[in-house]
Amino acid sequence: MDLAERQALRRVAGLSTELEDVTEVEYRQLRLERVVLVGVWTSGTATDAENSLLELKLLAETAGSEVLEGLIQRRQKPDTATYIGSGKAQELADIVSATGADTVVCDGELSPGQLRQLEEIVKVKVIDRTMLILDIFAQHAKSREGKAQVELAQLNYLLPRLRGWGGNLSRQVGGRAAGGVGMGGRGPGETKIELDRRRIRERMAKLRRQIGGMTTARETKRSRRTQREVPAVAIAGYTNAGKSSLLNRLTGAGVLVEDSLFATLDPTVRRAHTPDGRLFTLADTVGFVRHLPHQLVEAFRSTLEEVADADLILHVVDGSHPDPESQLAAVREVIGDIEGARDIPEIVVINKADAADPVVLAQLTAKENHTVVVSARTGAGLDELRAVIERELPRFDQEVRLLVPYERGDLISRAHKEGEVLGVEHTGDGTVLHARVLPGLFAELERTAKPVETAV
């Protein structure tokens, strides 16, 4: 649970005044959207197509809907007019009518024309995978930066899909050559849609300026950590792979943990220590998914920079998933688009080992070079993960053995907090400190302390 949620008011069970007979006063129960899923299988095996539709089902349920049917069509490529073809679209309309569905969700990004024509045939709302993911992000965004990023991605998606009033507003025409209408037929034109477009562009420009200002604040915080020479570790991975659970296990961050897709969007940075006492930061990033909308990648670029500026990436993958290798490939595809992230060392953390098939774990371990098998729920394998992080992190510290005067006890305290103290000995002239410290503290110790060999 989120820390804020723990301190919030909680409902007491059994005190609801919900009416069972809806004819008494009003209908009070929340009615979930009833959806039918449609996918086009263009490549890969039938299992790959079914896994993709299963993931779409989880996305639809996360958005707050009830899935009634799931349909897959085998085609070389999606139909340019209706995505699944006119005949199959009519069959889909019959299924929607029989099941009583009110929404059709397509497993792909549809063009504005495909959305409009498919809606005209099935007579219910049609949305695509991109719109569904954007809706989930809008539900889960909590911070000011996250909300601005999601709104920018939504407006970017909506801009080419605006619809005008059609016949209600006549378009501007000329004489007979322009439309055969003649004099008196010149209408005011479809000005409303142009007005909407201008407002959307103005809002997008304002959001970009706001996100730019937030990016400056994030870079300032990051530069402070860099100045202190604190190594940075970023947790990246597929959504619902257990990134937040792993962060909580390693640092006690108290981040929201929930069995749903994209439960946490805002990046969280926490301090942690290696087994030998070295300080480093651990950042939890936004989750990835197959065919992640490019609008989101563009809008969340400032958040994804946490990955690019890291010294080490913990790539978390769900070991209990039917196809974990496709998760690895999808995440690496997005990370590859982030400037400077390709060359960062990567450790593949196979999570949920307590629920995974041992054969799948063995296959993943054999295929990937640097792997650690853990379970964030039970804590198994975390000690090995900490040891691997300690071995892979770059060392910025230097070993010192100096005599520190007693009046500079603050330097001894900083050595305990920021470095690795190997030994402390109290003498008549001061404290003999044997430690590994970062360059900033090393410079200050050299100015204040004396070498043990020359101390009188």
Image (spheres, helix red, strand yellow):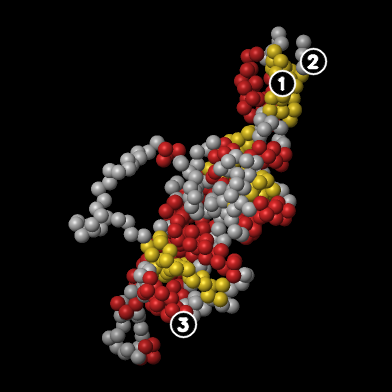
- How would you rate the neighbour count of disc 3 (Cα within 10 Å): few for under 14, some for 14-19, many for 20 or more? few
Q: Nearer the viewer, mark 1 or mark 2?
A: 1
Badge 2 or badge 3: first in the primary sequence: 3
Q: Residue furthest left?
A: 24
In the rendered image, which residue does mark 2 sit on?
Answer: 454
Task: Please determine whether, in this image, residue 290 is positioned above or below residue 87.
Answer: above
Residue 226 percent coordinates (x, y) = 63, 39
Residue 160: image quadrant is bottom left
Quadrant of the snapshot with the C terminus: top right
Q: Which mark is residue 423?
A: 1
Q: Nearer the viewer, mark 1 or mark 3?
A: 3
Please state which amino acid type lies under the numbered disc 2: Thr
Q: Is residue 439 left or right of residue 184?
A: right
Badge 1 or badge 3: first in the primary sequence: 3
Secondary element type, mark 1: strand
Residue 25 percent coordinates (x, y) = 19, 56
